Image (cartoon, rainbow, N blue to C red):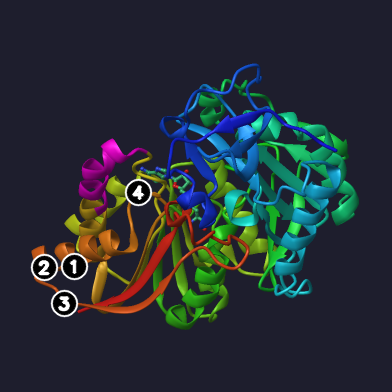
Amino acid sequence: MFRYPTASLKPGREESLLGGHLWIFSGALQQPPRWIEPGGLVDVKSSTGLFVARGYYNPRTDIAIRILTHSIEEPVDSEFLRRRIRSAMELRQVLDPTQTNMYRLIHAEGDGLPGLVVDRYADILVAQIHTSGMERLQPLLVEALMTETGARGLLLRNDGQARRREGLQVEEPLAVAGEVPAQIAVRENGIQFLVDPWQGQKTGFFIDQRDKRQAIRKYTRGKRVLNCFSYTGGFSVYAALSSPTSSVTSVDISAPAIEIARRHFTLNNLDPEAHHFVVADVFDYLEQAQSTEQQFDVVILDPPAFAKTQGARAQALKAYRHLNMLGMQAVRPGGILLTCSCSGIVGLDDLLGVLSQAAQRLRRSIQLLEAYTHGVDHPVNLAMPETAYLKAIFCRVE
Ligand code: SAH
């Protein structure tokens, strides 16, 4: 029989947990559980002493407990991790491996494993551990991931600054199982890309844009396309491949990213000389385009998150409005704008509001065509809508 220390809730605080929510804020606890190290496992009980759920505890963070299971019968052990991994793998079977062999395998709370992100690039896994609770499970986790997936290597990218909030070290990337090459050749919707799992941004590629990249193809045939915040040219390659007469300009502030974008063109038998690659600040680039009255048929805006905290929300909305006004001015009348936001605190309605305000101020009319979120490999636990972060809106600007 397994036994875990107990944390008791204040009266009535079990409701959201019973509805599937996976976080307990410190204010909901009767008293902090004693004798538990940060990241240690706990059983959560209601004020009347009934078992509610089981998770891990961290006294340092506002989210005191993250839930792993609602079943009293389920110990948190290797078998538990394997079941969660298998369930996640089953969902990803909707992706055709002959076309797409990179995807998010574990999306934290969305896959019932709070604090863990695992991306799969062909036969290499790249994991990020965000919490002390997951950190303590790491040895079991590495073993479970390797055996369940049959991967050839696993790289830990525990280099995010957010780890400090949990009391964890920010580490250098580390191969904890097998061998991890400096570059992995992968395909997405049949298109070839190269991923650097050691030094690339996040885990190497922005795989949450796969379905939006597929969707852009129909708008870009034979068109002049401006891809702002292009990173390694994900959207750019799709746009260029959509027709031999498409012309694509990729803009990013990162010179290494732009260099790889160029290589991605060559890799897919596109002539980089027929397209433009620009290392620049997008805001400067768009202002310049405005002053020289340069316009495009299709403009893509996929900026980094402008706000990470609720306090920065108003500021972020202003920044999105400014960017979208600049972006819209670069769209020729009747052209397409794809605008994205990966700020969790900015919702779909917020982004639609930003677009509509930007259009009003510019005296242009705007039609909503399509709206997307993250895609199937980034499932969201609907009891926790606050964990959704990506919005992508296609519209036409007259
Ligand atoms: N659309 C990309 C992902 C974009 S991530 C894809 O599909 O892969 C955000 C990118 O914005 C990063 O590559 C980062 O280098 C770049 N970036 C951040 N601030 C910038 C700025 N002010 N001007 C230009 N690029 C910027």
Q: Secondary structure at mark 2?
A: helix
- Residue holding disc 3: 365
Q: Is residue 200 visible?
A: no
- Find disc 4 in the rendering and name its residue: 345
Residue drawn at the location 57% of the way across and 20% of the way down:
167
- Asked which secondary structure carries label 4, the reply is loop
Q: Is residue 322 magenta?
A: no
Of badges 3 and 4, the one in the foreground is 4
Q: Could you give the CA–CA distance between mark 3 and mark 1, rounded to whole angstroms? A: 8 Å
**Residue 310's spot in the image, x, y percent?**
31, 40
Q: Residues within 10 Å of mark 2 (few under 14, many from 20)?
A: few
Q: Which residue bears the numbered disc 1? A: 356
Count neighbours of disc 4 (C-alpha within 10 A) and say few if under 14, some if 14 to 19, many if 20 or more. many
* Residue 2: quarter of image: top right
Above or below residue 27? Residue 83 is: below
Front label number (4 vs 2): 4
Q: Mark 4: which amino acid?
A: Ile
On whether residue 312 falls in the magenta region, the answer is: yes
> Is ligand 1 within 8 Å of the beta carbon of the residue shown at mark 1?
no
Three-letter code for the amino acid on which mark 3 is drawn = Ser
Mark 1 and mark 2: Cα distance apart in space: 6 Å
- Chain-order first, disc 4 or disc 2: 4
Q: Which residue is mark 2?
A: 360
Which span is picked out in magenta? 309-320
Q: Considering depth in this image, is 351 or 325 the residue closer to the camera?
A: 351
Q: Residues within 10 Å of mark 3 (few under 14, many from 20)?
A: some
